[in-house]
Image (cartoon, helix red, strand yellow):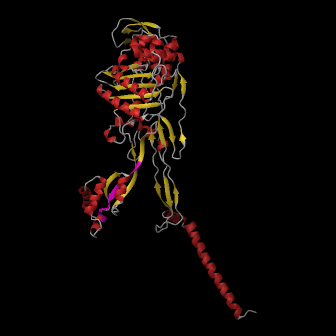
Amino acid sequence: MTTRATRGPRRRTVVALAVILTVLATFVVRLVDIQVVSADEHVSDSLQHLGAGDKISGQRGSIVDSGGTVLASSVMVYDAQLSPKVIMLLEDNDPELPWAEASEKIAAVTGQTGDEVRTIVADALAADAESQYAPLKKSLTTEQYIELRDLKLSYLHFEARETRVYPNGAVAGNVLGFLDNSGSAQAGIEQMEESCLAPVDGEESYRIGKDGVVIPGSERIVDAVNGGTVQLTINSDLNWYLQQMIAEEAQKQGAKGGTVTVVEVKTGKIRAAAEWPAMDPNDLDSSTPETRYSQIFHKDFEPGSTFKAITAAAAIEGAGLTPLSTVTASSRETFPNGAVINDSFNHPAYNYTLAGGLIDSSNVALSKFGTMVSPDVRYDYLQKFGVGEKTLGFPSEVGGILHPVSDWDNQSLYTTTFGQYFTVTAPQLAGAYQAIANGGEKIDLSLIESCTGSDGTVVTPDAPAHQQVVAEKTAAELTQMLENVAVQGGNADRIQVPGYRVTSKTGTAQVSDGNGGYKAGVYYTSMVGFAPVDDPQYVVVVTLDEPTKVVSSAATASAFQKAMTQVMKTYRVMPSTIPMDALLPKFG
């Protein structure tokens, strides 16, 4: 039997249950509204408040030379700003350091005058009485930043940023390249090795509430990864000397420019790439767009007589000739197809040996020797020695021009025997002579030793390709003939390197007028050789762009002699121990 005493608790239980069910139903309805009905709206709203973050910038890697000398690095600099309004507010409230005194202290650090600093603030207030920003000085060093920070001025603010510096200035500047104002690589090694040098930025992230307060425990940091260090094959001390020397020689000859390229015979490594005009990546405004890129890799030219050695190689191997094989050649001849070929000097008909044709650099003689093999064979030898192909994929590098045999006309059938109707770059010319010096084995040129990551991991490039382009015997005969050129040629007295036996060959190339012809009386001159002959170590290529004082290849003789001498000294190459006369006949 239900009594009044038992009905009370039961009623209360029912009421409590009803309340609980009502509250639960309210939560369910609200949950459905949040997660289903208004889901998109709430997600959008949450994204505005749940997370935030700041980028953590990594540092770009350095570029160093073969010995570890830093050629390019990144440093932190600071841009300082002032808050004019805060300065005036403090000035009106009896500051501990009056603005007149504070501005003098600031100026003493920034290298400005107190008047200049005060004028910055006055001008900002004149333009806007509520101004909170006035630029003070950009690119302050860390030391300057610390000095200014220690003044503890609430109206002085700083923005840190990374900048690129090149401690050796213009040394190999055209090869190093540069960055634009946004920090993007624009040329040279900076662009070529972007994958190694570029950092990976990190991030500091966290969650914030709707009121902007960071939610405790929500912080997360992803560290930045600094860029790696690129080590070059270049010797910066040697490069510095050669840049000074070629600048002097080019200006002495009234040339538009000049270059020196040095290649290690047994490895194909480029040990120097010097040029004038030279660019200082620290001061781009002092250069022109044309001089901001490496002319060594960017400019191609007809090699002229320097490639007569390649014609000789084709004739030796393709026609069975020897250095003593002969032809009769005068200084001007008309060939059966109507082509007319001239030598650079007048002479009667000579009975030229192949070696003698190289010594006198006779175009007529080499035309006759060269056409003893088919055009296809000569084309193949030009290709094997690197004509028409880039050497190492350097930014802005050109590959030169090698026309197919089907384009050779009556004249170019012969001119291709003495370095016309195709073009090369200085590295291609160096690579061709590297093969001769290395017993006929051509090694692809290289400019990069390694990339060392910020974690210490060292990555080296793939090993350069090796190709036997001529037989070792052929290379030895070419070396003998090229040494005779150095000893008996017209520049013999000017290119001697005391204590060393050297080879050499000159080139005096006509310059295209852009319309299928050549500029009158204008030449691009070059000289290439290697030393020491008894154990070849280094190839040196010197070029002058349109010299005006001496317009023949003799213009390069002094620069070649100085460059080869310095290379021998720099690498302490042992002098030749066996005199030439004890080994070789003199070819006439």
Residue 121, image x, y percentages = 27, 59
Q: Is residue 383 magenta?
A: no
Residue 349 vertical position relative to residue 358 in the rendered view, above or below: above
Residue 211, image x, y percentages = 46, 69
Report the side of 405 relative to 557 (left or right).
Answer: right
Q: Is residue 81 magenta?
A: yes
For the point 33% across and 24% down, which residue is it? 513
Quadrant containing the N terminus is bottom right
Q: Nearer the viewer, residue 137 or 9?
A: 137
Q: Nearer the viewer, residue 561 or 261?
A: 561
Quadrant containing the C terminus is top left
One can see residue 375 in this view: no
For the point 47% across and 8% down, which residue is it? 325
One can see residue 163 in this view: yes
Residue 552 vertical position relative to residue 224 in the rendered view, above or below: above
The part of the image, by quadrant, that contains residue 242 is: top left
For the point 61% across and 76% down, which residue is it? 25
Q: Residue furthest right?
A: 1
Q: Which residues are magenta?
A: 75-86
Q: Nearer the viewer, residue 532 or 185?
A: 532
Which SS does the magenta portion mostly show?
strand
Residue 215, image x, y percentages = 51, 66
Residue 338, image x, y percentages = 39, 10
